[in-house]
Image (spheres, rainbow, N blue to C red):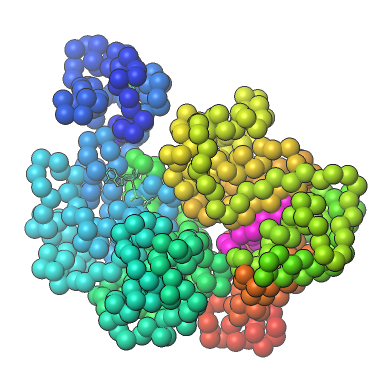
Amino acid sequence: MRLAIIDYDRCQPKKCSLECMKYCPGVRMGEKTIEIDENTGKPVISEVLCSGCGICVKRCPFKAISIIGLPEELSEDKIVHSYGQNRFKLFGLVIPRDGVVGIIGQNGIGKSTVLRILAGELIPNLGKHDKEPNYDDVIKYFRGTELQEYFEKLKNKGIKAIHKVQYVDILPKVVKGKVGELLKKVDEKGKFDEVVEKLELKNILDRELSQLSGGELQRVAIAAAYLRKGDIYFFDEPSSWLDIRQRFNAARLIRELNKVVVVEHDLIVLDYLSDYIHIMYGVPSAYGIVSMPKSVRVGINEYLYGELREENIRFRKEPIIFEKRAIIDFKNRPILLSYSSMKKTLGDFKLEVSGGTIYKGEVIGILGPNGIGKTTFVKLLAGVIKPDEGEVTKEEDIKVSYKPQYIAPDYDGTVEDLLSSITNINTSYYKSEIINPLQLEKLLDREVKELSGGELQRVAIAACLSRDADIYLLDEPSAFLDVEQRLVVSKVIRRIADEKEAGMFVVDHDILFQDYISDRFIVFSGEPGRFGIGSSPMNKRDGANKFLKEMQITFRRDPDTGRPRANKEGSQRDIMQKEKGEYYYV
Ligand code: ADP
Ligand code: SF4
Ligand code: SF4
């Protein structure tokens, strides 16, 4: 079976000369391989007539077409949902069960589609477009499987599904009011006070939803879902915008619920949260396949290996390997800068940092909550602001390039315009180091203002790393990226640190990402918005230990993949490691 996918957002028949039709050998032979849809005025490709030659893919000036061969085991009768001819198709479905079922997969692979189907928001059409989808057909389709009963209940409205959506930032547009009042209104369990405490919402109860930051909105959305009485709960990316402690607080709360399906890209959080895993694979925006359910350890490991052992399927050529980074002795390398202990007061906020030395080519991971003074610290190093006490010693003027946490898409122009205004993007070096790994090729002609969160993030990282600087500060580069993109970004950052001998400061709440990318850690603690205390740069083991002790979370290493895993709270390992004071893996 072959899929012809058209990205109708890119396709612009008024601006091209219909090259797809003009050059299609089928059309030239007089067949209806490609026709123009009367309603939309856009082309439709017949997957039956298409020979898969790929000429239209190359000829389309807007890169709107993909022709994709499907794995042999897939056939039309295995489609659970199709968004239309030449559009995304979903094969298979997640099986909800008691406990937490986690879904792992790239962006655009159909995870949200799965959640919408199981939440009863979308009736799957089984790939048929000739009539309105209905539950009777779906029940027939899943007869004899665990999903039959589930859809029977959905049909009879016997399932109350609670869905925490992915894009919490749109909530203020649909719901108005104060946090406390809104949460009280949905509190069907009488657990308002408990949730306010566990998700640390006390200080924002009197605020309007429209005044909340992303992380605050996320916690309110999670609280609202938790407080309602449901038969099943869906959480789409609960950790976006949250710092590490908030991620684990949310995870603990979600685990209290009976039946949950969760989509999550922070593998440590997903691991901690889930009892089972479904892997989703395929080609983003074209088709997605749902694997059989797996135990958490096996599921995450197989995802990283790119291979489903039981099904005997390899879905990615290269495994994702989080290699244990060799410990480099930077003391023999040139110094970028040194600083004494410093103090700085900005309005009501006080920052205190212990002194340290940063070497060229070193990546320093910064761990700590948001609003704790990390950016202020880097500004002190760069000389953008002066400390009240203490000093920075450096040879010359040091240039800093900064990617903020909140990236505003306020640039007028295309991605190409933006990047070209910073550097020459037409060199083979730039293509191989930035454009290709960050998958920017298809974004170059897009308006910056129209990018999605994950696309904007990759462009912002590219823009930051393209500037000529001695210090790079990347605030939350992993936000909105999927697991595979996170790995790619970490490799790009490492390579640029090595090549430019720059100092990299990376603030990120994904510990797997931090563990992979950093040479040393600086740990910030304190009270967000009031005071922050920064440690000296510490070796990774000591830094992680200090940080995890504050979080009261212990880690071990997976014996097969080497990835860090959070111990379940109260498990034997957790208790033993806490007694020994070994919070990082032993
Ligand atoms: P994920 O949650 O894994 O990122 P989604 O389920 O959101 O993936 O989307 C999978 C694919 O389906 C994407 O290519 C998306 O563009 C497409 N898609 C999602 N919703 C619709 C829709 N209503 N109409 C057409 N295509 C859609
Ligand atoms: Fe033009 Fe490409 Fe659309 Fe065909 S697919 S109509 S070539 S933009
Ligand atoms: Fe026509 Fe070839 Fe494109 Fe198929 S792949 S629609 S046969 S040009």
Query: What residue is at 55 percent from the left and 53 percent from the top?
Result: 406
Q: Can you give x and y, in whole percent of width and height, for residue 562 in the image?
A: 62, 63
| Residue toward you, 242 or 326 | 242
| Residue toward you, 365 or 467 | 467
Task: Name above or below for residue 7 compared with residue 519.
Answer: above
| Residue toward you, 559 or 571 | 571
Q: Can you give x and y, in whole percent of width and height, for residue 299 in the image?
A: 44, 62
Query: What residue is at 19 percent from the left and 12 percent from the top?
Result: 30
Q: Residue reaching furthest front? A: 347
Task: Name above or below for residue 163 compared with residue 422.
Answer: below
507 drawn magenta: yes
Please state the total of marks drawn on the protein image.
0
Query: What residue is at 40 percent from the left and 20 percent from the top?
Result: 61
Residue 507 visible in this rendered orientation of the protein: yes
Residue 378 placement, left or right of 150: right
Q: Can you give x and y, in whole percent of width and height, for residue 82 in the image?
A: 23, 44
Quadrant housing residue 84? top left
Ligand 2 rendered quadrant: top left
510 drawn magenta: yes
Residue 43 placement, left or right of 417: left
Residue 494 visible in this rendered orientation of the protein: no
Quarter the C terminus occupies: bottom right
Quadrant housing residue 329? bottom right
Where are the magenta residues, as a range? 504-517
